[in-house]
Image (tube, rainbow, N blue to C red):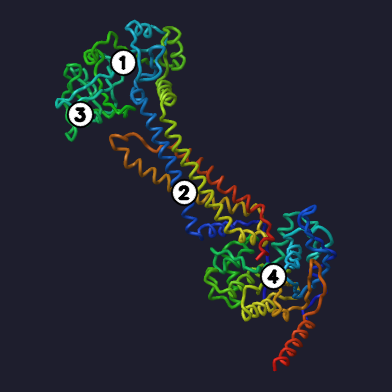
Amino acid sequence: MKKGNEYAVVGREIQKWFGEGEARVHALRGVDLEIRMGELAMLVGPSGCRKTTVLSVIAGLLDMNGGELTVLGETPAQMSAQERILFRRRNLGFVFQQYNLLPALTAAENVAVPLLAGGWNRIDAVAEATRLLAQLGMEDRASSLPALLSGGQQQRVALARALVHKPRLVVCDEPTSALDAATGHTVMELLSEVAVRPDRAVIVVTHDSRVFEFADTIAHMDDGRIETVETGAARAQQIAAQATQARELYA
Amino acid sequence: MFSDQVVFVESEVDMNFVALKMLTGDRAKYLGLIFAIAFSSFLIAHQSSIFAGIMDRTRSQIKDVTDADIWVMDRNTQYFDEVNALTDNDLYRVRGVSGVKWAVPLFKGNPRAKAPDGKFRVVILLGLDDATLVGAPRKMVLGSAGDLREPDAAIIDEAGYRFFFPNQPLELGRTLEMNDHQVRLVGICDASAPFTTLPVVYTRYSQALGYVGRERNLLSFVLVKPEPNVPIGELAKHITQATGLKAMSGDQFGWATIMYFIRNTGIPINFGITVMIALIVGTVVAGQTFYIFTIENLKQFGALKAIGVTDRRIVGMILLQALVVGSIGYALGMGMAATFFAIFVHQIATRGIILLPQVMIGTAVVVIFIVIVASLMSIRKVLVLEPAVVFRG
């Protein structure tokens, strides 16, 4: 529905291993994936299937050992370390499982960090962050420290931090796993509402099947490979069918 | 919902604000770091200043002689307190050296003085040239140095006066007894505190013989003033070559005396150990606290790296944090040391011992060393940190 023709991420036969010799652990065994701009893509699978490793490689936080990867039309493997940092700073937004907010900074200051890292002055950055928090319904908590916020509120702040510098790719690692079902649902609603735009792609790593309905595409991973890719609509139909089946079973 | 363009510049100066908030956000560790550095720098400055003050006292009587530039003494003399008497002939030979404007005798001895109430103490007796009174005290509290020309006259330093006449007002005319001779105090002066804390008594050279008892020669030192435009060092060399006596400037003699005490007493070792303990404790406590502070913030640093903060900027943030705690700790430490010396500088026992500017500079260098060592461990930890760590729940 929001998809563009441009690809945000194209990966071919991505290989990643840790260690050498007998100690080598093959983490990614030839991952192929395509994520279009305007798409909310989910990487799902059981624990240990290396979803987060794929996310780290796409985000330029880990080097890959083989294959080809294009992110937003650029090839991270050909960038220097400094270029990769600047690329991340300009183009990527991050939402972490544990939020990773700086405990000494207020919500607005936390949101402002990507702008400060990009050279904005503090007053302008905090003002911009406060504006964004207001759009996310957090205007009354902009001056609160993270410790005074609920899990859902902290994840909203983390979401604002991921979006404040208007990145073209947002990567989210288990954004709902630390939240209860209702709050997780709210956060995903917010994510799909404010983050997904025609000129931006969102990648969500999750094993929380309750949020699959928000995906445009779902890539199922197992043992370092993407096994199947299905559209969010198909998956939603499947979930609805399972729900109907369950209702009939217990009726 | 949002505008399309965010302009980035390659500057991250306002990340300093984030660094400072991270630092002050954890109050307990922040204060712990500051107090570790404050007490460390206080101890270092305090002990170093006392050491320097005590060492400086060993040359007090040399410093107080401001009229003459060169001290001449027996060639085996090592320091001020241990002298071998010269002969009158030596004085004449010194006077004969080309470039000498004038040369006068100075006696230094340690007779025992007794107050009328029987209280006695060994004193530092300085016998000054009768004609010129070269070496007379410059800072008089009561009386005049010229009154030394009166019969049986002596000047005593204020600390000595307060020892012999405790809780009594400063007044002239009181008497002491030295070697069965009565001495009349015609002046009270402010002499630099001696290393031995003994009272300092000034009298005329001709009178000093009567106060010390059986010594054939009284001539401890010859004090020399060079002719105008004659370099002090050159003249000292000429005097040594011409007479075979040791001659050196007042400054050189002062340092020779200090070095004697440094080489031959345990004082520097004792103070050195305290300073080293302060340095080690300060470094370890500050380093460990700073390291724990970094470890506890490792995920946050990882998040910053993931977001796109450069390693260089993160190192800058850590160094800024270290610099801030170092500066505040140093300022507090110096404040405590300055307060201590301001309180005790006027006490008899500790008079003249002050917080030296050189000690402040030296302590600042040590504090810089402490914070660099403390931050190096943290910097290393953050530099090797993979930003992907932020994805591990």
The residue at which mark 4 appears reads as A172
User: Same chain for marks 2 and 1?
Assistant: yes
Outermost residue to the bottom: A251
The secondary element bearing badge 3 is classed as helix
Of residues A120 and A170, which is closer to you in this image? A170
Locate residue A194 relative to residue B143 in the image: left or right. Answer: right
- Report, in whole angstroms, how far the alpha carbon at label 1 lies from the one at label 3: 25 Å
Q: Are marks 2 and 1 in contact (CB under 8 Å)?
A: no
- Report, in whole angstroms, how far the alpha carbon at label 3 lies from the one at label 2: 44 Å
Locate residue A104 relative to residue A116 in the image: left or right. Answer: left
Using the rendered view, name the quadrant where residue B59 is placed. Answer: top left
Q: Position of residue B201 (x, y in %)?
A: 25, 23
Q: Quadrant of the C terminus of chain A?
A: bottom right
The residue at which mark 2 appears reads as B36
- Pointer 1 chain: B
Q: Nearer the viewer, mark 2 or mark 1?
A: 2
Q: Are marks 1 and 4 in contact (CB under 8 Å)?
A: no
- Three-letter amino acid code at disc 4? Cys
- Report, in whole angstroms, how far the alpha carbon at label 2 lies from the one at label 1: 51 Å
- Report, in whole angstroms, how far the alpha carbon at label 4 lies from the one at label 2: 41 Å
Using the rendered view, name the quadrant where residue A124 is placed. Answer: bottom right
The secondary element bearing badge 2 is classed as helix
- Pointer 4 chain: A
Q: How many marks?
A: 4
B204 relative to B144, above or below: above
Which of pointers 2 and 1 lies earlier in the amino acid sequence?
A: 2
The residue at which mark 1 appears reads as B106
The residue at which mark 3 appears reads as B164
- Three-letter amino acid code at disc 1? Leu
User: Same chain for marks 1 and 3?
Assistant: yes
Residue B72 in view (yes/no): yes
